[in-house]
Image: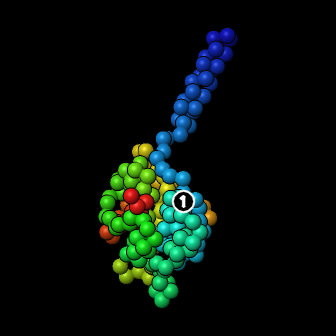
């Protein structure tokens, strides 16, 4: 009877050890990006404002990010966001890296703004999402797009919706 009880306790302890080990959080790389809420059609200016806010921009600068919004087309372009960021005193450039480069950008302290373009023939408009952090395996990314909450996306989803076209990204850094 003692042996059975001892075996049960040993099995229970082994199960708990496996559960604790597997529950350890996967290391993450990322940035502390303040959440900013904006209208769905203004994901571009909103994500740019989040990046500039993380860099310490004041409220006047953050309001000027709306200059990238085109009220006629009811959207923004990556080029307009780049121009506004440069005009506001930041270094901004458009790049076309693979999604595997997102981890490197985050590790360098650069929060990438992804341009999600609609598939040809669809009625959608460009949307933008900011990658705030990721697990170090590059399997899951925490994204922000102007909603009051962040969204966890798997790499396969990002590869499908972002890299399906040309996989463009806006990289904004402080001026040196």
In the image, residue 152 lies at what x, y percent? 52, 56
Check disc 1 and report its element: helix, strand or loop: loop
Q: Nearer the viewer, residue 50 or 89?
A: 89
- Residue extending furthest bottom? 72
Q: Nearer the viewer, residue 93 or 40?
A: 93
- Give the residue at x 38% y 66%: 92
In the image, residue 32 lies at what x, y percent? 54, 53
Quadrant location, the N terminus = top right
Q: Nearer the viewer, residue 91 or 37?
A: 91
Q: Nearer the viewer, residue 26 or 5?
A: 26
Query: Which picture quadrant has residue 149?
Result: bottom right
Question: From where the camera sits, is residue 44 visible?
Answer: yes
- Residue extending furthest top? 2
- Give the residue at x 44% y 82%: 123
Quadrant location, the C terminus = bottom left
Task: Establish if 76 lies above or below 136.
Answer: below
In the image, residue 50 lies at what x, y percent? 53, 64
Question: From where the camera sits, is residue 140 visible?
Answer: no
Task: Establish if 115 lies above or below 21.
Answer: below
Number of residue marks: 1
Task: Establish if 23 lies above or below 56.
Answer: above
In the image, residue 23 lies at what x, y percent? 56, 37
- Give the residue at x 43% y 60%: 174
Query: Which picture quadrant has residue 122?
Result: bottom left
Q: Residues within 10 Å of mark 1 (few under 14, many from 20)?
A: few
Q: Which residue is mark 1?
A: 56
- Give the residue at x 58% y 59%: 34
């Amino acid at each position: 009877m003692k042996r059975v009880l001892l075996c049960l306790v040993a099995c229970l302890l082994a199960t708990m050890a496996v559960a604790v080990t597997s529950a350890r959080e996967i290391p993450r790389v990322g940035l502390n990006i303040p959440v900013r809420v904006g209208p769905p059609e203004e994901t571009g200016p909103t994500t740019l404002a989040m990046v500039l806010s993380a860099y310490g921009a004041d409220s006047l600068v953050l309001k000027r990010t709306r200059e990238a919004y085109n009220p006629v087309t009811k959207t923004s372009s990556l080029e307009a966001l780049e121009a506004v960021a440069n005009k506001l005193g930041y270094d901004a450039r458009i790049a076309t890296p693979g999604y595997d480069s997102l981890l490197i950008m985050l590790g360098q302290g650069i929060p990438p703004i992804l341009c999600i373009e609609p598939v040809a023939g669809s009625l959608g408009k460009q949307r933008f999402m900011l990658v705030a952090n990721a697990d170090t395996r590059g399997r899951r990314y925490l994204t922000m797009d102007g909603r009051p909450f962040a969204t966890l996306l798997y790499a396969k989803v990002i590869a499908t919706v972002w890299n399906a076209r040309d996989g463009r990204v806006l990289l904004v850094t402080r001026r040196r």
